[in-house]
């Protein structure tokens, strides 16, 4: 089966929740960053529907990037605020673009 979310030359690194949804007894709110593992746990059909209707937005990294040597990825949360993803979310609170770019250049927290 063809993966409708695939972009040639890029790999999905996770997703950002744009509309809140329920996950069992837990609620997942807009602005939540889903790791690749959390995004992968969502069923394929549900994932396609949620991406199409804007509930979640996947983010991609170049497929040739090595996770060990790569810089972090900036995720825009709106209002000029950013998160930095380096395998995991590296910041507890949203950052300005300058702060996020500086943090993205630091080695990952699990290195």
Image (spheres, rainbow, N blue to C red):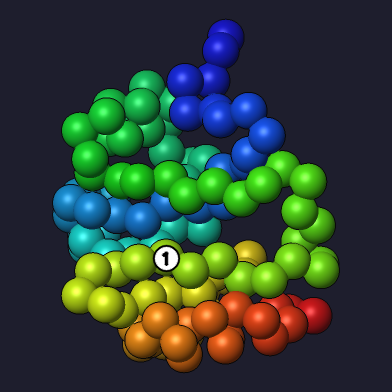
Mark 1: few, some, or many residues within 10 Å (few <14, many ≥20)?
Answer: many
In the picture, measured across the screen, residue 28 lies left or right of residue 15, that is left
Q: Split into 4 quadrants, where in the image is the C terminus? A: bottom right
The secondary element bearing badge 1 is classed as strand
Q: Residue 26, how many percent across, how many down?
A: 25, 60
Q: Residue 30, how many percent across, how many down?
A: 22, 61
Q: Split into 4 quadrants, where in the image is the N terminus? A: top right
Residue at the spot x=78%, y=46% of the render?
A: 64
Residue at the spot x=57%, y=88% of the render?
A: 102
Check disc 1 and report the residue beneath it. Answer: 75
Instruction: Please name whichever residue, 89 or 22, is drawn nearer the observer in this view of the structure.
Output: 89
Q: Is residue 57 visible?
A: yes
Residue at the spot x=54%, y=47% of the render?
A: 60
Residue at the spot x=42%, y=38% of the render?
A: 42
**Does 13 sit above or below residue 96?**
above
**Does 12 sit above or below residue 100?**
above
In the picture, measured across the screen, residue 53 lies left or right of residue 38, that is left
Q: Is residue 26 visible?
A: no
Residue 20 image-quadrant placement = bottom left
**Does 37 sit above or below residue 32?**
above
**Does 21 sit above or below residue 31?**
above
Residue 47 image-quadrant placement = top left
Q: Residue 88, how many percent across, how many down?
A: 57, 70
In the picture, measured across the screen, residue 67 lies left or right of residue 7, that is right
Q: Residue 104, how many percent across, how many down?
A: 60, 79
């Amino acid at each position: 089966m063809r993966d409708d979310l695939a972009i040639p030359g890029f790999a999905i690194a996770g997703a950002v929740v744009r509309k809140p949804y329920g996950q069992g007894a837990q609620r997942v709110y807009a602005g939540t960053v889903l790791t690749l593992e959390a995004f992968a746990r969502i069923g394929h059909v549900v994932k396609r529907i949620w991406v199409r209707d804007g509930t979640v937005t996947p983010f991609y990294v170049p497929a040739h990037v090595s996770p060990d040597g790569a810089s972090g990825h900036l995720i825009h949360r709106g209002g000029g605020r950013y998160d930095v993803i380096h395998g995991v979310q590296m910041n507890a609170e949203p950052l300005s673009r300058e702060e996020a770019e500086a943090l993205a250049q630091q080695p990952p927290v699990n290195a």
